[in-house]
């Protein structure tokens, strides 16, 4: 079977981590063709061609795709759909914006956030904040799927797929780009970071969140936060980890002052090693932590940062 994978492209650069993990998942479905759609995406296409498991790469280099607008990219995917049984993308902000439109235009169901592939038409996805796994079988002729990449290892580099330039599809003109307002930081991106340090309501204030940031910077880690911390104004919304935030699975996740509500656990429980620091020894976070420290975070975190 043939699979069309929409690569995660930021500007003109390939998000290698997200795309490589999606490639690993897509290989279980058939021969993988990667689509890079952006302005000046030639470099992204070359990077995608180096991933093991990629059969070929399509490069749609056009200004209409340069700012990630969902409508023109969805129309491009639909124009290519006749040659593929599966159309997939990482379950990122971009993928979750584009693929539902593709499914609607093709009049098929969207299968979202899959974490497992049983067969070509049967998939596993978490529900109820990750407390249950739903098995979904689709009889649609074409399967449109977003992949929760935290459940898959990244494909290695070493491939040499051919890169083909393709023409843009007609632009539906349903939306236009006005401007991007982006925060810049020297820290790793939260969803692809190898280490994440997160703070919760127990941190107490926006000023106290500097303790979390100092520890993260010492570890060259990304900074996360629980929803309670974000709702309290301690941390910005794009740091939120959980069911209604970002899903992460780093090698090391340090939860500081986080009780471990089910909504938060849904966003980080697949982390390789979980460390919890909380003064409440009954906190639910200790039930899933590999290492737990019952201590006042205002004593423990500065001491840990100093020791490091």
Image (spheres, rainbow, N blue to C red):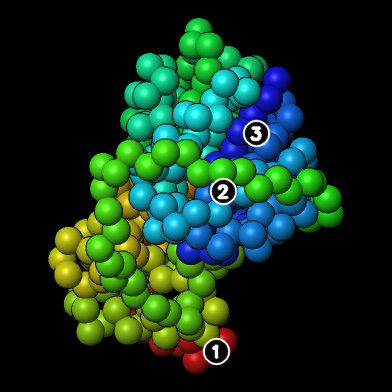
Q: Earlier in the sequence, mark 1 or mark 3?
A: 3
The tally of labels here is: 3
Q: Quadrant of residue 252?
A: bottom right
* Residue depth check, mark 1 versus mark 3: number of the one nearer the observer: 3
State whether residue 69 appears in this view: yes
- Identify the residue under disc 1: 307
The disc label shown at residue 9, or none? none
Q: Can residue 289 be seen here?
A: no
Cα gap from disc 1 to disc 3, whole angstroms: 43 Å
Q: CA distance from mark 2 to mark 3?
A: 20 Å
Element marked by disc 3: helix
Q: Earlier along the polypeptide chain: callout 2 or callout 3?
A: 3
Q: Residue at x 38, y 73 (%)?
A: 295
Of residues 216 and 188, the one nearer the viewer is: 188
Which residue in the structure is indicated by mark 2? 60
Helix, strand or loop at mark 2: strand
Q: Which residue: 83% across, 50% down?
A: 160
Q: Circle 3 sits on which residue? A: 26
Quick one: 283 or 57, which is closer to the camera?
A: 57
């Amino acid at each position: 079977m043939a699979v069309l994978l929409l690569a995660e492209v930021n500007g003109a650069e390939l998000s290698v981590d997200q795309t490589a993990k999606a490639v690993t998942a897509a290989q279980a479905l058939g021969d993988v063709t990667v689509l890079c759609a952006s302005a000046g995406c030639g470099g992204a296409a070359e990077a995608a061609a180096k991933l093991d498991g990629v059969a070929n790469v399509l490069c749609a280099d056009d200004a209409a795709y340069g700012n990630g607008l969902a409508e023109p990219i969805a129309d491009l995917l639909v124009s290519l759909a006749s040659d593929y049984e599966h159309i997939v993308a990482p379950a990122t902000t971009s993928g979750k914006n584009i693929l539902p439109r593709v499914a609607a235009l093709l009049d098929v169901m969207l299968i979202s956030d899959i974490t497992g592939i049983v067969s070509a038409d049967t998939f596993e996805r978490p529900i109820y904040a990750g407390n249950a796994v739903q098995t979904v079988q689709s009889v649609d002729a074409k399967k449109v799927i977003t992949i929760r990449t935290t459940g898959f290892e990244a494909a290695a580099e070493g491939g040499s797929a051919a890169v083909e330039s393709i023409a843009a599809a007609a632009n539906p003109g349903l939306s236009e780009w006005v401007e991007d307002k982006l925060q810049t930081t020297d820290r790793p991106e939260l969803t692809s970071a190898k280490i994440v340090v997160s703070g919760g309501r127990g941190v107490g204030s926006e000023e106290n969140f500097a303790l979390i940031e100092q520890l993260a910077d010492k570890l060259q880690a990304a900074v996360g936060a629980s929803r309670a911390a974000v709702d309290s104004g301690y941390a910005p919304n794009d740091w939120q980890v959980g069911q209604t935030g970002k899903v992460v699975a780093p090698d090391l996740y340090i939860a500081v002052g986080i009780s471990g509500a089910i909504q938060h656990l849904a966003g980080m429980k697949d982390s390789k090693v979980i460390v919890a620091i909380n003064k409440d020894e009954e906190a639910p976070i200790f039930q899933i932590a590999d290492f737990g420290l019952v201590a006042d975070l205002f004593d423990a975190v500065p001491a840990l940062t100093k020791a490091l």
